[in-house]
Image (tube, grey):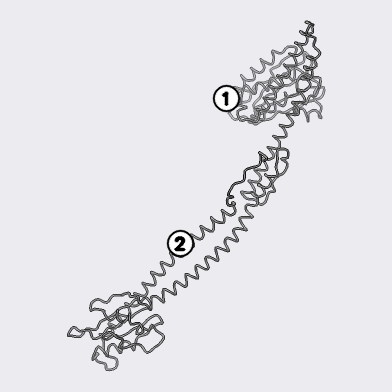
Amino acid sequence: MDDQTPPQNARAGLTVRARVIVYLVTMTAAALTAAGLTAYGIQRSHLDDTISDDLRVRTEDFLLFASGADPTTGKAFASADDLLREAVRRASLTRDEGVVAITGDSARYVPASDDRLMLENDPEFIAAAASASPGPVNVSAVTTSVTDYRYTAVPLVNPSGAIDGVYVTASDRGSLLGTLNATFRVYTLVAVGALGILALIAWISVGRLLRPLRLLERTARHISETDLSERIPIVGNDDLSRLTQTVNAMLDRLERAFSDQRQLLDDASHELRTPLTIVRNRLELLEPRDAEAVTYARDELLDEVGSMSRLVDDLVTLAKADRPEFVQPETVDLFELTQSAFTRAAAIDNHKWILEATASGDASLDAQRMTQAWLQLAANAVKFSPAGSKIAIGSSLEHGWVHMWVRDEGPGISASDLALIRERFYRVDPAAEGAGLGLTIVGAIAHAHGGMLEIASDVGVGSIFTISIPHSLAGDAA
């Protein structure tokens, strides 16, 4: 089995798309359920209050009617039976309301209309209502095998204290509650349907939103160590499209890094192959018994080893150039830095050294790395300038940039060479000493400071190499 093959999970998890849909549907269902239950509770309470208020109004109307005159005679009611008969006859009812006049344990009078609540057909209710006792009239509840009732019962008490009859007004709470329940059953069906439609729309919408992620995953599977050229198509103009742009930029950097790494290894192997071949050949041809030949070979091989050591040191420097710790900025006096670099460069013989200008003020930079780059430029000037010629070193602080330069009177650099001179191992003069990494290192140091290496040259006149970095501290140009 390939060691690089990722292990498969024993139990695959839900995709991001599915998790988003589940979360969205669950939260929406919870909101709809909470809203439905709250509305149902409010409507049910309102229904009970409406029934109770209606029953109290009807009871008050009956008591007012009982205290007045008999409409048929114009006089007070002659008996409780007359009162009950007239009150029942005049009752105006809906389908869920009913009245009944009870004497003893049975219904004495009922309304003539059939479009009402038939209280007389429920013996359990008649028995419960007939047991009402004198006192304050309250809304009572009773549930029988027929339905759930809310009712008021007004006993008619004669002067002897006996009950001549009971006037009962009732509402069919069970029917009204059934209507309310049916309404919320429809609400439930509509909510379920809405959730289904929401899930479908969300599935399509989330799928479109997550399309860049699927493209990212597909592209990531296609990318290998030897092929980093594939990029993710950018869809839309939102957070995910910006993520796609960021990932593509990261892939660009990775591709450049891998390309630079391969190029560095190829160039290093090429540069090291020649001195290693020389060392091997010299050792193979060496005559151990010839002391003079051994001494000569030793000196020659030490020179080759020294060249390889310098090459390795330069490669290590370039390898560290992209690391955050490559430069460690600190507050540096530009005047002192320029003086120090000039003093160290002027120690090289056979040239006339000139301190052309100095900047005053402080700057935030790595003094050791910057001195290394400055001296590398000075060494290049010495290498390619005729003996006794002038080499100028200077610095300035202008418009928020620190400039540090080396000017020589060498042969100059052609336009074709200027385009390639910053490349690793490129040498204008192949016979010149060095591996061709000097300017590459200088450029890396300048880049690590957020700056650049600028080169201007006139063939037959000379060249000027300038390190320019942004200035982050206040200072005055000299």
Amino acid type at circle 2 is: Ala
Amino acid type at circle 1 is: Thr
Whole-percent x and y of residue 475? Answer: 59, 26
Relative horizontal placement of residue 12, taking residue 57 as reference (left or right): right
Identity of the residue drawn at 37% across and 89% down: 112
Residue underneath mark 2: 34
Whole-percent x and y of residue 83? Answer: 27, 88
**Most foreground residue, 122 or 471:** 122
Identity of the residue drawn at 32% across and 88% down: 109
| Mark 1 or 2, closer to the camera | 2
Q: CA distance from mark 1 to mark 2?
A: 64 Å
Relative horizontal placement of residue 23, taking residue 111 as reference (left or right): right
Q: Residues within 10 Å of mark 2 (few under 14, many from 20)?
A: few
Quarter holding the N terminus is top right
Whole-percent x and y of residue 70? Answer: 27, 90
Compared to residue 202, the image places residue 267 above or below, namely: above
Q: Element at badge 1?
A: strand
Compared to residue 423, the image places residue 242 above or below, namely: below
Instruction: Name which quarter of the figure residue 155 lies in.
Output: bottom left
Marking on residue 331: 1
Relative horizontal placement of residue 195, taking residue 114 as reference (left or right): right
Q: Element at badge 2?
A: helix
Instruction: Name which quarter of the figure residue 260 lies in.
Output: top right
Instruction: Name which quarter of the figure residue 296 lies in.
Output: top right
Quarter holding the C terminus is top right
